[in-house]
Amino acid sequence: MTRSFRYLCAAAAAALAFAQPAAAQQKLKIGFITTMSGPQGVIGQYMKDSVELALDHLGRKVGGREVEVIYGDDQTKPDVGVQVAEEMLKKHQVDFVSGIIWSNVMLAVVPVVTGAGKIMVGTNAGASPLAGNQCNELYFSTSWNNDQTPEAMGKFMQDSGVNDVYVLAPNYQAGKDMVAGFKRYFKGRIVEEVYTKLGQQDYQAEISQLRAKNPKAVFAFYPGGMGIQFLRQYDQAGLRGKLPLYTVYTVDEISIPAVKEAAVGIYETRFWSPDLKNPANQKFVSDYRKKYGKLPVFYGAQSYDGIMLIDSAVKAVKGNVKDTKGMVAAMRKASFDSIRGPFQYNVNHHPIQNFYLLRADKQSGGDIEMRIQKTIFEKHKDSYSQDCKMKW
Amino acid sequence: MSLLFEQLLNGLQLGVTLFLMAAGLTLVFGIMNFINLAHGSLYMVGAYLAVAASQWTGSYAAGVALGLAGALVVGMIVEVVALRTLYERDHLDQVLATFGLILFFNELVAILWGRASLYAQLPSWLQGHVDLPTGAAYPVYRLAVIAVGLSVAILLWYVVTRTRLGMVIRAGATNRTMVAALGVNIRLLYTVVFGVGAALAGLAGLMAGPIYSVQPGMGELVLIQVFVVIVIGGIGSVRGALVGALIVGIVDTLGRAFLKPLLGAMISPTAGEAAGPALASMLIYLLMAVVLALRPAGLFPARG
């Protein structure tokens, strides 16, 4: 008896050990890819903080299930992004992948995730192919298409009769896309279009050229560290306040603390602002301030929405994440309290949403913050959705 | 014409900043035969310490003093603790080890000050602009950077060519075994030279702080241009570093400003549009290639 009994016990124990995970409900797993290291790592930190706040607001449960978020660092490189996504899918067996700041990383990662049959929720990058002919049933965006924000700025400058505009952007795909989006709505005179080296630090030479041309306004796209340098040097050259500066993705809650006064009076367009008045946003902003002691930034707002969108989908299928069809159908309804207020998804799974004019000003408390000045577009659709052949 | 003058001034300002970095790097390479990739980290350390000190004390002067002293001390500590053992090793080991130092310093400042860019404030007397004779307003601070850079260049020239210390340094660059045999403490000399090079990098960093952004990894952005400078100037030569830095600064600036209109006028506007920005960002590397082809040892080789 002794030997066979021992074998039996061992077999039973082994069986139990293997059976265990299936019996108790597994945790829901979300892989969140962003940039955590290097000069752009600060954006990743804001996104991660916002994801954590979303989990707090949901009682650390997504769709009623215990959740584990696995963070991955793409180091701003497409190949690293793909590696991280594959590890999340194979090793961690995640149910969703979300995040991603850069368009080139997004274009590389989306086929990997959707190819594995999982849903990808992009929370920043707005690469045009994904809104157009490469749109995918399993890809949703909680941000925008790249062109929409400069389109709004072009519309505003066109409507206010600004003319003789000097245009500056870094010399890479997104830089050219931004200018193309701007020109789709701005039909006035453009004095000069200047493309600078990506990652350039010193803009004094360009500023001297610009001043010599005597334009009436400047339109610029300088994301991240480039924006901080450009804004500061524009101010040091004595142009701020004299020559109006209109920017996209340049002045935000990350760059304002670094440039302070140099941001005052500069215009931006955006789909969101911390002072946007709706209950979900007010709760997000005030709790973010309480938890982290600073204002959130749009990258974070979109990431917060990403978690809320996943939550709404998992709830709709009662936690059964095998029901991908059911979750896609639920996501298409966008039935969650978005920080941008209620919105609808376009046929290409990109939001149809408002765009606002923002300006950075010194507020009564002494802090420099951005405030909404007016609504430029209501329910604005991106210009690529007609190329998307998806049927709902 | 006035625009050209203004752009020359811009080029000069970029040039002297590059010179401050290049002087230290080229001395260390010339005398110790040591490749220091972590030179950009000392630039970053200078910038961070200056910002931190001026925030603690509220005084710009205190920031400058601590930035300089801090970079000097950090440089000497790094030399004694980490680099001393590497002098006898080959260049690949040195590159690997100093690359490790880059990662170490970038993470260290990220832990101490966070990943977000810091704000480097200027005192009010450096904030304004002056009217150039040509009529354009030019930032006072950039003129101050040019003045400091040129004074350091003169001071360095004096020390290297007219003092005993400079004589030992030049001798060390030519034949260090002989210098050691003559009773000069070569170890101490190495530490001093490395420390001074670090302080110059720190000076460049703390002057760059108010113009650029003070953030982890800021040193690597300038380091590439600095290597171009010392290759053009001749590795190991301070005079070469100065000439190389001014050439690179001016060529880069003028290229960015005038290449596009020039190509547009000479070939066609669309050609200028398409090739101008790309060519402008390659210009200093093309220049380096030409110099290497014609004078492989650089414009002012240190050793004959």
Image (cartoon, coloured by chain):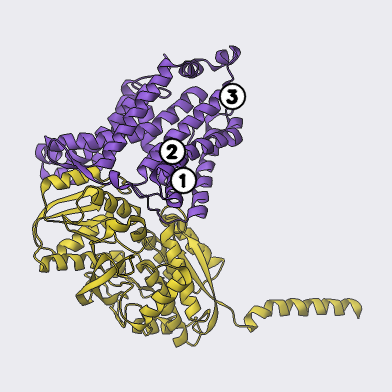
Q: Which residue is mark 2?
A: B202
Of A377 and A279, nearer the camera is: A279
Tell me, yes or no, if residue B277 can be seen here: no
Asked if labels 1 and 2 touch by Cβ distance under 8 angstroms, the answer is yes
Q: Name the spot of residue B263 as percent of width and height, x first.
A: 14, 39
| Labelled disc at residue B187 | 3
Q: Which residue is mark 1?
A: B49
Side of A376 where A368 appears, left or right: right
Q: Sequence-wise, which precedes: disc 3 or disc 1?
A: 1
Q: Is residue B274 visible?
A: yes
Foreground: disc 3 or disc 1: 1
Disc 1 residue type (three-letter): Leu
| Above or below: residue A213 compared with residue B233 | below
Residue A377 percent location from the top left of the image: 20, 74
Chain holding disc 2: B
Earlier along the polypeptide chain: callout 2 or callout 3?
3
Identify the residue at horizontal 51%, vertical 45% (top origin). Answer: B105
